[in-house]
Amino acid sequence: MAVTHYYQTEVGWMGQRRGYLRSSADLPVIEVASPPEFNGHEHTWTPEHLFVASLNSCYLATFIAMAEMSKLDIVSFTSTAVGKLEKVEGLGYRLNEIVLKPKLVIKFEYDAERAQRILEKAEKNCFISNSILSEVKLEPSIDFETMCAHA
């Protein structure tokens, strides 16, 4: 039996190339706009930023869930995501590539291989990765809090 969930958002125009984004899920309202390179506004979330951020935040949530289930000792995790927007002949603009650059610090060096596998598995299981046409590239970095032999 399929499990289905629904997520609703609303956008509204605020004049010029600005709008608001909100949800009935009691989330903070954020201002959105076209980016400056498309006659929009600086210092405002854009659809391009939100698209890349949705992949990056999904990757974070998927990785953390898998790491918890695997009992991986995480010291810290951050991830930078860079999306490449290109004009494609006959298709218009597309985000053709998103590079995820997670930086993971784990407690023990002997967990490095397992951590790498979990990072890769998280990208393959992130529902946003599985829902988009953009190529997703993973460029992880793993550091260690301690350099010790097998426990």
Image (cartoon, rainbow, N blue to C red):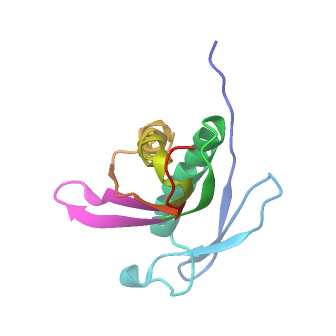
Residue 72 sits above or below residue 42 on the image? above
Residue 93 sits above or below residue 124 on the image? below
Task: From the top left corner, tell me how far across and down residue 21 is, in percent.
Answer: 67, 65
Q: Which residue is drawn at 38% across and 79% down?
A: 38
Q: Residue at x 74, y 68 (%)?
A: 29
- Main SS of the magenta part reads strand
As for residue 140 lying within the magenta part, the answer is no
As for residue 85 lying within the magenta part, the answer is yes
Q: In this view, does 88 lie to the left or right of 70?
A: left
Q: Residue at x 68, y 57 (%)?
A: 10
Image quarter (top left, top right, bottom left or bottom right) of the C terminus: top right
Task: From the top left corner, tell me how far across and down residue 4 is, in percent.
Answer: 66, 27
Q: Give the range drawn in magenta.
A: 80-102
**Residue placed farthest to the left in the image?**
89
**Residue placed farthest to the bottom in the image?**
42
Task: From the top left corner, tell me how far across and down residue 148 is, in percent.
Answer: 51, 55
